[in-house]
Amino acid sequence: MIEKLYNWMMKQAESKNAVGVLMFVSFIESSFFPLPPDPVLAIVVAKNRDKAIYYAAMCTLASVLGGFLGYYIGYAFFQLIGAKILAFYGQVEKFEEIVITLNKWAFWIICAKGLTPIPYKIVTIASGFAKIDLCTFAVASMITRSMRFLVLSMICKIFGEQFLNFIEKHKKITLFLIIISVIIGFLLVKIFI
């Protein structure tokens, strides 16, 4: 399975669909999907280093738009969809605390959580449920997501060749590290949110 995922990501990075796949993964990650777009972005940029800023911008745009979907889920469909997503992440008990914190420090919480491996969809859904000002949500999301994806893109642009060589030599370790980072994100959610 790990080998198939790796081969799929490499194939997408070299295809004409690279931007579409990157944007799709980034969009759904911000509202409900558990896997982050970072590995796809890293490989796409490493394979196409001259377009690093473009890919970071597209990933940011899709992530922010996906964040609006997460916001809408929390705002209009919390009981139907949002509560189930939060239950999947084990956040039902802490949700009231998240909403109270968001009401006090919305801009800063959205910025801080958007940079971490903590699943961003929890913040987007909670922001909608708390009815955080949409302008505040949009600005904070744009700042935090653009910083995250731009930094990753620049690292992959500078070290792209070494990055790809490492991945090629250590496929299983690399994908294992990606899975570990997702698990760490889940653990951070349990501890800090």
Image (tube, rainbow, N blue to C red):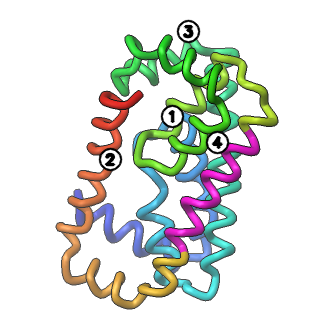
Nearer-N-terminus badge (1/2) = 1
Local SS, label 1 = loop
What amino acid is found at the position of numbered circle 3 in the picture? Answer: Gln
Image quadrant assignment for residue 149: bottom right
Magenta residues (range): 138-153
What amino acid is found at the position of numbered circle 2 in the picture? Answer: Val
Classify mark 4: residues with Cα within 10 Å, few (<14), some (14-19) or many (20+).
many
What residue does disc 1 label? 32
Nearer-N-terminus badge (1/4) = 1
Cβ atoms under marks 3 and 2 closer than 8 Å: no
Name the foreground residue: 173 vs 10: 173
What amino acid is found at the position of numbered circle 1 in the picture? Answer: Phe
Labels in figure, total:
4
Of labels 3 and 2, the one closer to you: 2
What residue does disc 4 label? 66
- Quarter holding the N terminus is bottom left
Nearer-N-terminus badge (4/3) = 4
Local SS, label 3 = helix
What residue does disc 3 label? 79
What residue does disc 2 label? 182
Nearer-N-terminus badge (3/2) = 3
